[in-house]
C-alpha cells in the first residue's frame, strides 16, 4: 500500500444535504399576522380587536338576532344558511348578552362583518350590516347580504362603495355605544328595552 501527496485545482464541489431545516415556518407567519392585526379600541382598552383582512379572516360574518324570539331566530338561520351555502364561514350568536357585547366577541376573533336581525326585519325584510373597524352600519334588504359580503371578501367591491349605496344607520348597541356615522346619510335608529322586549325605532329629531 502506497500513497502520495498531490495538488489539484477543484472548480466545483457538489454537496447534497441529508437534512433540510427551513427557518421560516408557518408558525412565524401566523404569529406575524396576529401581532400586526391586534389593536384596542380608542378610549376603551377592554375592547380588543383582531383586524384581519376579510380575505384571510377565518370567519367572514356574524349573524345576530336583536331578540331571542322565534321570528328573529328564524331569519338568523335563513341568512346564516345562505352565507354558508356561498362558502362564507359564518358565526351565529343567539345568546342573551347585549348586542354590544356580542359585537365585541366577534371583534375579538377578527370577524369583519356582523349582520343584525332586528324588529324592522320582521316588517320590511331589511337588516343592518356592521363593519368591524369603523363600526359603521348600513341598512339593506336581507336578500342583498350574501352578495355584499361575498363581493367584499373576493375584492369585487369595497366597504366604502357599499356604504355609499345603502343608508347609514346609527344603532344603540345596549352598552352605551353606537355605530359612528353621518346621520344625514340615512335614518338613525335607536333600540329601546321595556317589559315586552327590545325594539328599534327612528330616533327623534333634534
Image: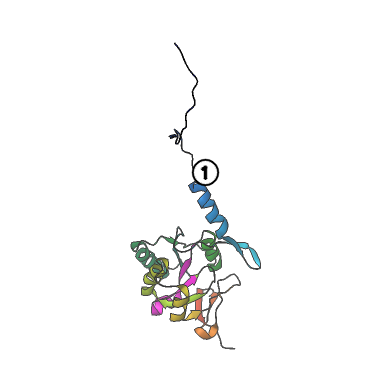
Q: Callout 1 environment at 10 Å: few (<14), some (14 to 19), or many (20+)? A: few
Q: Whole-percent x and y of residue 204?
A: 56, 86
Residue 123, percent from left and from top: 40, 79
Looking at the figure, which quarter contains the C terminus? bottom right
Left or right for 75, reference 111: left
- Range of the magenta residues? 111-130
> Vertically, is 162 above or below 32?
below
Residue farthest along the top direction in this orientation: 1
Location of residue 162 by image quarter: bottom left
Q: Is residue 152 visible?
A: yes
User: Residue 97 or 193: which is nearer the viewer?
Assistant: 97
84 vs 139: above or below: above
Rendering coords of residue 165 (x, y %): 43, 80
Q: Quadrant of residue 181?
A: bottom right
Q: Residue furthest left?
A: 85
Residue farthest to the bottom, as pictured: 206
Is 115 magenta? The answer is yes
Residue 196 seen by the camera = no
Location of the N terminus (image quadrant): top left
Residue 52's x, y, as percent?
50, 61
Q: Secondary structure at mark 1?
A: loop
Identified at 37% across, 74% down, the residue is: 144
Report whether 40 appears left or right of 82. right
Q: Nearer the viewer, residue 37 or 59?
A: 37
Q: Which color scheme is applied?
A: rainbow
Q: Residue at x 55, y 68 (%)?
A: 100
In which quadrant of the rendered view does residue 120 lie?
bottom left
Q: What residue did someone put label 1 on?
A: 23
Q: How many discs appear?
A: 1
Amino acid at each position: 500500500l502506497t500513497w502520495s501527496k498531490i495538488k489539484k485545482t477543484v472548480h466545483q464541489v457538489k454537496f447534497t444535504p441529508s437534512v433540510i431545516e427551513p427557518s421560516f415556518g408557518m408558525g412565524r407567519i401566523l404569529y406575524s399576522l396576529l401581532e400586526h392585526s391586534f389593536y384596542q379600541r380608542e378610549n376603551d382598552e377592554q375592547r380588543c380587536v383582531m383586524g384581519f383582512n376579510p380575505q384571510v379572516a377565518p370567519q367572514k360574518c356574524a349573524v345576530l338576532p336583536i331578540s331571542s324570539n322565534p321570528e328573529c331566530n328564524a331569519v338568523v338561520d335563513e341568512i346564516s344558511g345562505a352565507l354558508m351555502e356561498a362558502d362564507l364561514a359564518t358565526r351565529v350568536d343567539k345568546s342573551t348578552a347585549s348586542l354590544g357585547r356580542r359585537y365585541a366577541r366577534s371583534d375579538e376573533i377578527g370577524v369583519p362583518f356582523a349582520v343584525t336581525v332586528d324588529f324592522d326585519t320582521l316588517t320590511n325584510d331589511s337588516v343592518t350590516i356592521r363593519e368591524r373597524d369603523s363600526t359603521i352600519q348600513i341598512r339593506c334588504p336581507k336578500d342583498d347580504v350574501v352578495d355584499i359580503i361575498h363581493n367584499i371578501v373576493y375584492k369585487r367591491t369595497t366597504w366604502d362603495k357599499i356604504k355609499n349605496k345603502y343608508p347609514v344607520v346609527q344603532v344603540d348597541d345596549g352598552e352605551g355605544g353606537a355605530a359612528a356615522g353621518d346621520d344625514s346619510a340615512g335614518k338613525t335608529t335607536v333600540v329601546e328595552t321595556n317589559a315586552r322586549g327590545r325594539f328599534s325605532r327612528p330616533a327623534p329629531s333634534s
